[in-house]
Amino acid sequence: MINLDSQLKLQAYLDGELAVEEAAEVSGWLDRDPEARALLNELRNTKAALVGYESAFRLPESREFFWSKIEREIEKQEAAREEAPHVPWYVWLQRHFFPLSGVALLSCFLGVLFIESGRSAGQFGEMEMASDDMGSYTFRDQNDKVTMVWLYNHGDESQFTDPSSVASVEPE
Amino acid sequence: MKIFRAVPVWAKVAFCVGAMALMSPAARAETMRLDALLVWGTDDPQSPNPKHRPVEAELARRLKKLPYRWKYYFLVSKQTVDVADGESKSKISMSKRCVLDIKNLGTNRVEVRLHGDGNPVSVHRESLPMHQLFIVSGDAGNETGWLVIIHRIDPRAEPPPPPLVRSTN
């Protein structure tokens, strides 16, 4: 298995980019290692195949002039960035403070609404009995949306101790 | 259209959310439409009073889930009232001996005053959102019970209530 560095060195050898000493080393390695030779052949074939399809791009001007154009364009853009107009403080304030104050106002408004609705929905009921002789049980079922109060007597003598007096449901 | 485009996005969002908040029930002063029912609970399948009729199936189903022991529920009388925010409806007669005062406290809350034989019995302040049942009940003798059921209904779904009439029961 040839590692990546060796593969790159082999590619450089093929492209003639190695120094004389290094080229000699690689040549010796190729003599010893048949796998390296096979890889070199493969790289050589690939290079030969690609050469036929590469179209040479020729600049219409000299290499120096081409790069000097790019350099000038970069300098121009950097100068424009430095000359960005100074934003007055009130414009900055208008741009940042107004949206923030709007969001804050909205949050307060929604908060108050949420608290009010929560108070109305979640508040338990209050009850006052007209007489101490009466008691009550309360049953709440949030799922079925029912609140039930059962009134009962503590004693029999009070005028309020007979809850049946509330409703004449019996036949007359 | 150009004016609309000139309005910042945050202002458009604030306007929409604010409008939705203003339309929420908590923000509105609502008139409540309430059904007040006087119901008799018993284990007898027939009421001795021919004027009594069984309560609606949906109400019976909900009552059977509660810790009441009765098998049958008969409607004795029913009143429908509209109560504006902050206002009261007094002397809602459920029977000869049972009278209610109902006050709309706002934000889905009501105050119910129960009177028996002309005497005050109890005062209840309860949250009553749409479709919530509020029931005040007690012993009616002979192992039967009475129930005063306050039920908020949607005014858009129901016809307006007739003028209050005194119950014949």
Image (spheres, coloured by chain):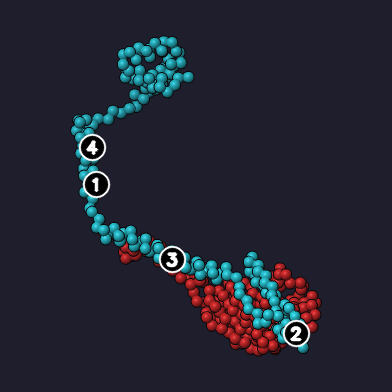
Chain colours: A cyan, B red
Q: Which residue is mark 4?
A: A70
Q: Which residue is mark 1?
A: A81
Q: Classify mark 3: helix, strand or loop.
A: helix
Residue B145: percent from the left, percent from the top?
74, 78
**Mark toward the viewer: 2 or 3:** 2
Ranked by sequence position, the earlier of labels 4 and 3 is 4
Residue B131 visible: no
Where, by quadrant of the figure, is residue B159 drawn? bottom right
Dot label at residue A108: 3
**Mark toward the viewer: 1 or 3:** 3
Asked whether the beta carbons under mark 1 and mark 2 sit within 8 Å of each other, the answer is: no
Q: Residues within 10 Å of mark 4 (few under 14, many from 20)?
A: few
Residue A85: percent from the left, percent from the top?
22, 53
Q: Nearer the viewer, residue A83 or A160?
A: A160
How far separated are the C-alphas under marks 2 and 3? 55 Å
Ranked by sequence position, the earlier of labels 2 and 4 is 4
